[in-house]
Image (tube, rainbow, N blue to C red):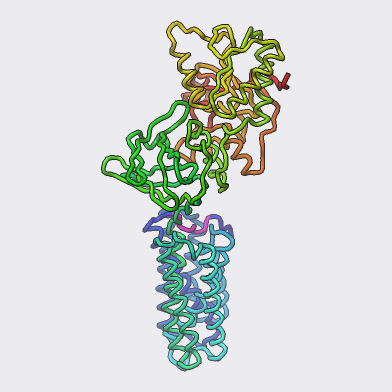
Amino acid sequence: MDMSGMHPAATGVDAAALVLRILLLSGTAVVAGLGLLRGSVRTTGRATVVVAAAAAVIAAAASLLSIPVQHVSVPVAVVHAVLVLALPILLRLPSPASYLGFALTVLLIVESGLGHSPVEFFAAAVASAAVVGWLGLAGYGLLLPAEQRPDGAPRLRYLAWALAAALVVAVAVQLFSTGIADRRLLSPLGAALLVLTLSTVAVVGAVLLLRQENPWRIYRFGAGAVAVAFVAFTVLPAIPRPGELPQPGVARLAHTTVGEQDVPVLVTPHRPGPNLVHLPESAGDELTIDSGGRPVRAVSRPGTSGYWAQVDLPAGRSDLVLRRGVAAGSVEVDTGDAPGPADAAGSDGPECASAALAGIVAGQRDSLTGCPADSLQQQDAAALRALVGYVHRNGAPGITVIGDDSPRSRQATGVVRTAADAARLPVSGAPRSENALILVSGWTNAAEHLESVRQRPGGPPNYTYGAHLAPWLLHSPVTTAAASSAAPLRFDPRDYRSLEYGMAINEGFGGEPPSVAGLETWLAARGQRIEDPISVYAAAQVDVMQMDMPGMGGMKMPMHGSDPAGQWLPRGTVVPVSGPLTPD
């Protein structure tokens, strides 16, 4: 049978889906238990058939209702309903009832564990088997007269012990996989795990009394605890797992609710002292960030997306409070006591945050020990030397190089000047209209300079030979500050891995645009790296033109530029304008 359409574990707090899941699995467990142990009793009475039929009707109804409520596969839901309804009819026939009970037990195991990790599937499978066996014992103990109960009380006592031990193992695995010592368990998830643990202790206690008490009375007593444990197992998948605990030095990505709005929050470097708090564009510009009674307004920064606030965080655990009017939400932080990178909250902090965010989205949880602007990478130095050669071959009479005070920018300025001297190109630090511009600063300074050139009345200096950006400046809030620009890159922003990263970061943080530092971090987390030859790519903003495509039913198709998630230049284009280059 194709199990791909089987009743999935609930992934959110959906009351209707949760009730259906409990009724489906619990009803199936009762029916399966009575069928599985049918061969151990001489006969069945009317009460047994009635209980089996009632449980079967409940399970079948829940299975069929799951089709519209949970969009379960119709054939799978119908087959499940037919199997549970058939067992009460076959209950008078020991062998067929036992075989069908076994089949329903397997089906229950699959349904209760489907969609879980291998460890959680194992726990659900063991628990389901234990519950089916125990409910079968308790059912016949409750519903049959003493003379008709299963033979071999000692043998059944051993079975009860084995089932209790299996349930203990299942609960232990569940607790271990969830993290029993995790303070996140102070939540609905923790309450469900507590109920599961206590009910399992009750089952073990019942088994320990089997030597001294009437076993059938103990089975009935244990059945209540088993039922509670099974319901707790069933409810667990419907409880959203709490967010990850903050780790000192690891950039903190969390969500909070302000009013009725979900707001993603990124905190870097997540160490004592100055920190940057980043919010996406969707959060709006009316939020303040409060850390210890010192509220700071989140504002936009040139060359970046979203909103930023620099706050001072104390050592250890504390809370960031986000406020919009009277509405407020909080994010737990834990900065530890070690210092973080000195420049992570400075002017180049947003690029550092972009790299850290990419690592988190890729599943990496490394401490932030440095930022991209701390030093110039060898591949970026090679790209800048190749760019100087490209500008020289295009006939530029000179170069204007503009940087800032960061270590990377100072080193990059030296690389450009050395390469220009070798090519006998004059270099200036002042704007000259006849020159080619090469920007090697950080995001904010680069965007401000491009914007000032763009808005200057009359245009000069217009940089006749174009504006050229260092590789790390390919970031849409920077590139959109100019009508067009070019950058030497070792990757194609249009290829699959570049767009995959762009879509991942867009989805992971409310529309965050991609960056070169983020791409490098994201690839490194996946065991990959950028190794393509250096080529110059031109970035230009393009109007969106539409046309009717034949055979498309009048649909409008974008011809130039578009704004899908993952693009490096929304409503623009980034295309190669050179072949592979080598440093001169």
Above or below 28: residue 583: above
Check residue 443 for magenta coloring: no
Task: Specify the quadrant that holds the N terminus.
Answer: bottom right
- Between 571 and 411, which is closer to the camera in this rendering? 411
**Residue 148 or residue 266, whichever sits in front:** 266
Residue 186 drawn at (x, y percent): 40, 62
Work out which residue is located at the far left of the displayed protein and give it.
326
Where in the figure is residue 574, as x and y percent of width and height? Answer: 57, 23
Tally of numbered discs: 0
Q: Is residue 432 visible to the viewer in this orientation of the structure?
A: yes
Left or right: where 62 falls relative to 129: left
Question: Where does the magenta region start and end?
Answer: 5-11
Residue 331 screen position, x and y as percent = 40, 48
Picture quadrant where residue 36 is located: bottom right
Front residue of this view, candidates 71 and 246: 246
Q: Is residue 460 positioned above or below 232 on the image?
A: above
Residue 79 appears anywhere in the view: no
Residue 6 is one of the magenta-drawn residues? yes
Q: With 309 as the anchor, is 578 left or right in this view?
A: right
Quarter of the image where the C terminus is located: top right
Which residue sits at x=55%, y=75%? 166
Task: Please tell me whether the stretch drawn in magenta is mainly helix, strand or loop.
Answer: loop
Which image quadrant for residue 510? top left
Residue 31 in the image: x percent, y percent? Answer: 47, 74
